[in-house]
Amino acid sequence: MRALAPDWGCFSQAMLQLPLQSRDDFNPGAGFNANLGLRYTASETFVPQLHSMRASRNAGRDSMPTSKTAARLSSNGVPA
């Protein structure tokens, strides 16, 4: 995680999947995933995190084209 300011951090990740070859007349498609996140770390008991994801896959002859975007707000929890 990278620090943006003393109490803020961020992260990112990207992944590209490409088929290297087809086999027995099977032609898979390519895929791409990207994740971004922001985290507020001022409190040791409650650390909210905003996470955004984008995933897509192209229409290779034998793949199902998909595209999806999601956002999630989570926390590490509050101890009793």
Image (cartoon, helix red, strand yellow):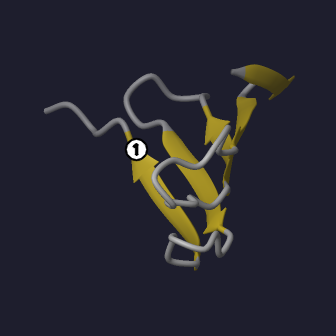
39 relative position to 77: left or right: right
Outermost front residue: 24
Task: State which quadrant residue 29 falls in.
Answer: bottom right
Residue, x 51% and y 61% (percent of image)? 25
Q: Secondary structure at mark 1?
A: strand
Total marks shown come to 1
Q: In this picture, is 7 found above or below 60?
A: above
- 77 vs 33, nearest the viewer: 33
Q: In this picture, is 44 found above or below 22?
A: above
48 relative position to 58: left or right: left
Residue, x 50% and y 77% (percent of image)? 64
Q: Residue 69, how many percent across, how many down?
A: 60, 72
Q: Residue 35, how many percent across, how many down?
A: 66, 47
41 relative position to 45: left or right: right
User: Which quadrant of the figure contains the C terminus?
Assistant: top left
- 37 vs 62, nearest the viewer: 62
64 relative position to 11: left or right: left
At label 1, the amino acid type is: Ser
Residue, x 35% and y 35% (percent of image)? 76
Q: In this picture, is 68 found above or below 10?
A: below
Q: Residue 56, how many percent across, how many down?
A: 64, 67
Residue, x 59% and y 53% (percent of image)? 50
Residue underneath mark 1: 75
